[in-house]
Image: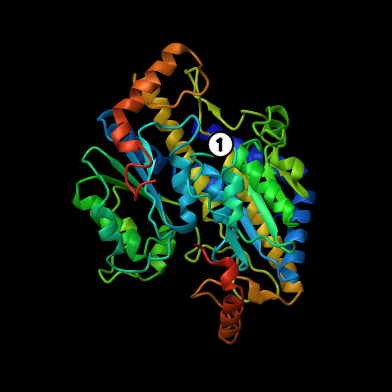
């Protein structure tokens, strides 16, 4: 007999994991993003396949950060195992020293992820990784370098999700099923972004935040000015690669 | 601040679990019945809610007969009437299929049009939305319709209108919140229940097993054949 509440029970365990085991990493990741944005950098978020959900938690959100964008790769995960694709893709990405790059990948072992991480660090840009440390360590890298995402990162937020990102056993099905990483990741990413916004506002950088709660002319004008300032880096159609 | 987020996430789980399990089970029944009849699940979400479709479709440990309905602008033109209708003109939706829409408000024109077109094709429609917001907000589509009004099954994310956001202490602003969190918990519970039903129906070949998992090697060719059978309808592009 299936326990229909299993996902809810597992989700509660991941809230506890975030609260009690990842507070420090959440704080460190927030500090990196704050420093980058204060220096005029932007946040670029990337997740391949379903991990795009994590990247979307960080950018283009109501009440979120203005200097933030998604890196969309055109194959939507289809080429993630092909060596050379990530390196070639990154040649077309405008990455600057004050930017911060945030990669979400459960295993962190596929060539696309490894090559993006390698390129980010080769340009001296800070890298934050949201990954499963135990999962990544259990699996062998799919890249010929043998490297994995977490080895490149300045800060690793560990989602503690099983290596294959499946968590439920069901009678009659041999393999475990049901992906859990998006549930685990959501409660790890929200505190990061909210902490960033809180500090930016306290430190006089509130103009970097979409203020949806205020309709005042002054706020609207300030936000328009911020958009103009970052327009060349944020417009979604200025380049076929970044969406 | 962090503790407030975690406390809020726990409250969300309680609210959804206490009030939405019947609708979640209805959704799972609808999808399992569709797949039993050879139908596929088609996921749609605009902009940020593309994540909902990604959660349901082409996911290891999830359901194989699935497809994402891609809107080429990824939500940039979601408020323009005609975008959803035009998108759906090239999407193959059949009466035996299920379309699942995730939308916080249910009022965005492209989302409403995808719902209208799905129903025109005779497919079952499941909408996951914030009912408090959807009921309160003024419709943005000329028909006056909201996506949830067209649905066969509605699942409420239980977010009071605009309380998907957090107040930042000491500031007069609201920032990003956990509305997607409720959605993803609902979606994965649906996936789990559908898989259970498919197992009962001896249709385990419709589940995507993780490579490297304890999958019976004898079943791999059966899964490959099944994938070939569905390939034309579920391809990503």
Tell whether A14 sits left or right of A42: right
Residue at the image position 66 percent from the left and 65 percent from the top: B40
Residue B97 vs B83, above or below: the answer is below
Residue A241 vs A99, above or below: the answer is below
- Give the image quarter of residue A167: bottom right
Residue B60 percent across, percent down from the top left: 54, 66
Residue A210 percent across, percent down from the top left: 44, 27
Q: Which residue is mark 1?
A: B80
The quarter in which the N terminus of chain A is drawn is bottom right
Tell whether A87 sits left or right of B33: left
Instruction: Kindly state the secondary structure of the residue where label 1 is placed.
Output: loop
Q: Residues within 10 Å of mark 1 (few under 14, many from 20)?
A: some
- Give the image quarter of residue B146: top right
Tell whether A121 sits left or right of B42: left
Residue A152 in view of the camera: yes
Residue B147 vs A147, above or below: the answer is above
């Amino acid at each position: 007999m299936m326990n229909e509440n299993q996902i809810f029970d597992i989700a509660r365990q991941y809230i506890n994991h975030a609260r009690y085991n990842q507070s420090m990493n959440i704080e460190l990741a927030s500090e990196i993003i704050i420093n980058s944005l204060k220096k005029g950098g932007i946040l670029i978020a990337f997740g391949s396949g379903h991990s795009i959900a994590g990247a979307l938690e960080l950018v283009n959100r109501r009440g979120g950060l203005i200097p933030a964008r998604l890196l969309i790769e055109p194959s939507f995960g289809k080429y993630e195992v092909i060596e050379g694709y990530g390196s070639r893709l990154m040649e077309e990405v405008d990455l600057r020293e004050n930017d911060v790059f945030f990669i979400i990948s459960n295993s962190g072992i596929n060539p696309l992820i490894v090559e993006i991480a390698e390129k980010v660090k080769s340009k001296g840009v800070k890298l934050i990784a949201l990954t499963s440390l135990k999962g990544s360590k259990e699996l062998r890298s799919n890249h010929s370098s043998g490297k994995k995402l977490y080895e490149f990162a300045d800060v690793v937020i560990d989602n503690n999700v099983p290596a294959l990102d499946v968590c439920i056993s069901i009678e009659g099905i041999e393999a475990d099923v049901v992906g859990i990483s998006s549930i685990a990741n959501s409660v790890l990413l929200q505190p990061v972004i909210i902490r960033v916004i809180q500090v930016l506002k306290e430190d006089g950088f509130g103009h970097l935040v979409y203020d949806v709660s205020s309709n005042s002319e002054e706020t609207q004008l300030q936000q328009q000015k911020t958009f103009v300032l970052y327009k060349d880096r944020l417009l979604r159609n200025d380049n076929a690669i970044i969406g | 601040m962090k503790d407030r987020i975690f406390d809020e996430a726990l409250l969300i789980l309680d609210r959804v679990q206490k009030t939405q399990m019947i609708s979640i089970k209805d959704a799972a029944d609808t999808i399992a019945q569709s797949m039993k009849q050879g139908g596929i699940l088609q996921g749609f979400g605009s902009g940020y809610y593309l994540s909902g479709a990604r959660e349901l479709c082409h996911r290891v440990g999830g359901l194989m007969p699935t497809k994402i309905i891609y809107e080429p602008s990824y939500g940039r033109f979601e408020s323009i009437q005609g975008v959803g209708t035009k998108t759906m003109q090239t999407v193959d939706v059949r009466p035996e299929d299920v379309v699942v829409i995730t939308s916080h408000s249910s009022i965005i024109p492209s989302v409403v049009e995808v719902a209208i077109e799905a129903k025109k094709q005779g497919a079952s429609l499941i909408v996951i939305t914030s009912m408090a917001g959807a009921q309160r907000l003024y419709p943005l589509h000329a028909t006056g319709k909201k996506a949830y009004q067209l649905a066969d099954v509605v699942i409420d994310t239980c977010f009071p209108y605009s309380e998907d956001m957090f107040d930042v202490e000491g500031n007069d602003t609201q920032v990003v919140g956990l509305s997607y969190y409720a959605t993803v918990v609902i979606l994965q519970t649906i996936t789990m229940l559908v898989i259970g039903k498919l197992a009962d129906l001896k249709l385990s070949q419709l589940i995507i097993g993780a490579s490297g998992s304890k999958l019976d090697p004898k079943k791999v060719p059966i899964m490959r054949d099944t994938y070939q059978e569905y390939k034309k309808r579920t391809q990503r592009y």
